Image: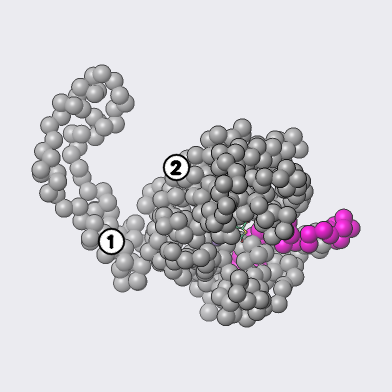
Amino acid sequence: MPDAYDPTPSDRFSFGLWTVGNPGRDPFGGPVRAVQDPCRIVQKLSEVGAWGVNLHDEDLVPFGASAAERDRIVADFKRALDDHGVVVPMATTNLFSQPIFKDGAFTANDPAVRAFALQKTMTAIELGVELGASTYVFWGGREGTEADACRDPQEALKRFRHAIDYLTEFCEDNGYDLRFALEAKPNEPRGDIYLSTTGHMLAFIATLARPERVGVNPEVAHETMAGLSMTHAVAQAMEAGKLFHIDLNGQRIGRYDQDLRFGSEDLKQAFLLVRLLEGTAGNAPYTGPLHFDAHAYRTEDDAGVWDFARGCMRTYKLLAARAQAFDADPEVRAITAAVTDARLDPLLDAPYSREACAALRGASIDAAAVATRGLGYERLDQLLVEHLMGAR
Ligand code: GLT
Ligand code: MN
Ligand code: MN
């Protein structure tokens, strides 16, 4: 029975061809599901209420395809997009599967690899532009090391910067209206990957030639693998105006990159993330694509894949409704808006000046009284749990 949590295209939900198309291969075993035709994926995504489909170059056009083959595949795919009303919000390059990328792509020691990575990316950018993408993701999955003595990590950063600067210039020169989104991951498939968290990426972006064109694509699994708060990473990106895209999924701390159905692990973090993205606490909401970079359990058949896709989207909408109710709850509002010392607000709001500083330093503060005041966070967090569990 359809209900208010069934997704529609206005929800801006998207999936990669590699996500719902994942045949269930892992490092210990081969595929358990048939490889799906990209056009069939587009049709199924529209049936389950998704809005967009994302892709790597090779998800659509096999590596080494002839120009004629490529044109036929792309034409068929565009027809499927039109027929089913699905858009391509984001495109990216596969810079990790081909053996040539065994030592990385943009950061590899061999100049032939770095040049090949740029060639491949420029061709893939043209494909993304042709399909109407407005965001281009860079996930440097192989940009890292095991034998760390192989290069100066500073040199790796210089090479990565050179590649991004080169490619933003390529877009400028060709009039491509694409924004780049850098995706961090701490490890896997490399022992250590450069620029391992969203925070590292944000600092790196400030050093680029065209920083305004470049933002981030944080992924739940990747920040969680690093033992960090995805919500805090996303908040920093939003506050910097750099949340260009997001990869939603589920992950438990201390594990391999699980890429599980959104909200299937750590529901509380998922709630806090959706609350932030939706802006129910009063912050400006995120209005970009909501991409699920996840895949169905290896136990699933084709029907299970679409249960998985529906599950990601429904959980997001359920959490958005719970967040709305939580932030509208008078008891929650009373705790989060607890009145502090009104005398001090103007002193804290005033920018530094000799006079303002003297006034601030002269204010009397009863440190013992402030320290003993209870903040009500136990009650606040219990209210969160009760909203999450449908008890309020
Ligand atoms: C790969 C990776 C993802 C990235 C994709 C973009 S590919 O599946 O695990 O996190 O977002 O290249
Ligand atoms: Mn991802
Ligand atoms: Mn992942």
**Image quadrant in which you'd find residue 389:** bottom left
Q: Does residue 381 appear left or right of residue 230 in this picture?
A: left
Point out the quarter of the image occupied by ligand 1.
Answer: bottom right
- Near mark 2 (Cα within 10 A), the count class, few <14, some 14-19 or many ≥20, is few
Residue at the disc numbered 2: 239
Residue at 56%, 54% in the rendered image: 146
Chain part drawn in magenta: 45-72
Residue 218: x percent and y percent? 52, 52
Which amino acid lies under the numbered mark 1 shown in the image of this protein? Asp
Mark 2 and 1 residues: CB-CB less than 8 Å, in contact?
A: no
Residue at 26%, 64% in the rendered image: 382
162 relative to 12, above or below: above
Residue 151: x percent and y percent? 60, 43
User: Element under label 2?
Assistant: helix
Residue 348: x percent and y percent? 26, 32
166 relative to 391, above or below: above
Residue at 10%, 44% in the rendered image: 369
Residue at the disc numbered 1: 381
Q: Which mark is residue 220?
A: none
Tell which residue pokes out farthest to the right in this image: 68
Q: Earlier in the sequence, mark 2 or mark 1?
A: 2
Residue at 59%, 80% in the rendered image: 300
User: Element under label 1?
Assistant: helix
Q: In which quadrant is the C terminus drawn?
A: bottom left
Q: Does residue 175 appear left or right of residue 182 in this picture?
A: right
Question: In this view of the protein, can residue 305 be seen by the observer?
Answer: no
Tell which residue pokes out farthest to the top in this image: 354
